[in-house]
Image: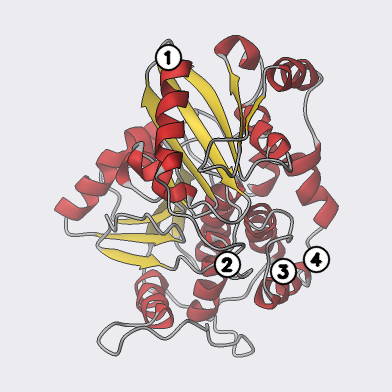
Amino acid sequence: MSVERDQTQPEPASPTPPADRPTIADQLRTVADILGRATDVTLFGHVNPDADAFGSAIGLATVLRDLGADVRVSFGSPLEVPESLRHLDSAGLFVPADQVPAVPPLLVVLDSGSLDRLGPLANRVAATRDAGGHVIVIDHHVSNTRFGTLNVVDDRAEATAAMVLRLVDALGARLTEPAARALYAGLLTDTSSFRRATPDTHLAAARLLATGVDTEAVARPLLDSHPFGWLGMLSRVLGRAELDRAAAQGLGLVHTTVTSDDAAGLRQEDVESVINIIRGSEEAEVAAVLKQAGPERWTGSLRAVGRVDVSAVARALGGGGHRLAAGFTVDGSADQVLNRLKAELDGAPIGPGRMSASADRLSTD
């Protein structure tokens, strides 16, 4: 496949690792060499994708399609693209999980820290590896388990979308508005609307916007649009919120639960928005939302202001994520899960204060 080169694009920057390890820029060039010659590429985001997972996959797929490859984007669940993300896939590159080839010749997995985050599509990883194909993992989660044949993991990156932009540069490919729109969505959401952003983040955003991205059209479905029933759900869920000042080693925990009845008729993204509301409680260092996933099964979203490493807490509960934003799934009653969470918070690593903007990111789980 021929690659259209754009000589105006800068060389991707990367922190300097030990001399015996390739830099992130080196790794991205290796991936670019593989993708630049590929004719068929399948791209995955994690189950219940957020804007960074889906936007990164759509953005990269759009670039590869423009270079002449056959591409498809998918995730393990749900069966359709969440409503708030549909505007990112203007070319219709998404295919349901059951339409993904049994043995993709080349697989790119984005924003997924572990194999189980792929749900029913996890078996495609083994199938591709067993057939001698590449499984390329591109991610910014510190807890990534490196399950690919090539793993490009930069836990200092603001978003996986930022890494994909650097990969586009390594490819020397032209950045079009549809690709930029998808990447901008990932950058917007994973930096908490640029509240947790570096100068490089804003420079990347400027490059994306220069292609003609309509910021309001991207942001409103992601951040400011909910069905009327969301208000009733919020009323019930916020009404049962509790503040435990003694939890998290005296730094405070605010928490609530979202039951199946609360979530009935609402979208996954409506339920996920609850954590971004309760985390505003100024008396609590940590915010937690437990969302019912079954009769005795709960998924948890964790956020910290700056001192508690909630990724360590999530890992202890079988999940993972970033230092200040993480998630997990556990079995038990809501009270049992909350007690386990509090016990893990009592032993969580505590820092002296807020980290620098380059490391202090906010991401969905």
Q: Local crowd at mark 3 within 10 Å, few (<14), some, or many (≥20)? A: many
Q: Identify the disc placed on residue 333.
A: 1
Q: CA distance from mark 3 to mark 1?
A: 43 Å
Residue at (23%, 59%) from the top-left corner? 133
Relative to 101, 248 lies left or right: right
Decide which of tag 2 and tag 3 comes sooner along the chain: 2
The color scheme shown is secondary structure
Instruction: State the image quarter where residue 187 is shown.
Output: bottom right
Q: Which residue is mark 3?
A: 205
The disc placed on residue 212 is: 4
Front position among marks 1 and 4: 1
Q: Report the side of 46 relative to 132 (left or right).
A: right
* Crowd band around label 1 with a 10 angstrom C-alpha radius: few (<14), some (14–19), many (20+): some
How far apart are the two marked residues, 1 and 2, measured between alpha carbons? 39 Å
Q: Which amino acid type corresponds to the residue marked 1 in the rendered image?
A: Ser
Q: Nearer the viewer, mark 4 or mark 3?
A: 3
Q: If the image is split into quadrants, where does the N terminus sit?
A: bottom left
- Mark 1: secondary structure: loop
Q: Position of residue 18 (x, y in %)?
A: 31, 86
- The vertical placement of 300 against 90, above or below, is above
Decide: few, some or many residues near mark 2? Use Cα within 10 Å; few <14, some 14-19, many ≥20: many
Residue 127 coordinates in the image, percent (x, y): 21, 46
Residue closest to the eye, 304 or 213: 304
Residue 16 seen in this snapshot: yes
Question: Which mark sits nearer the N-terminus, 4 or 3?
Answer: 3
Q: Nearer the viewer, residue 241 or 181?
A: 241
What's the amino acid at mark 2?
A: Ala
Mark 4, secondary structure of its residue: loop
Point out the tag, 3 or 1, that comes first from the N-terminus: 3
Residue type for callout 4 = Gly
Q: Which residue is mark 2?
A: 162
**What residue sits 32% from the left and 65% below the top?**
151
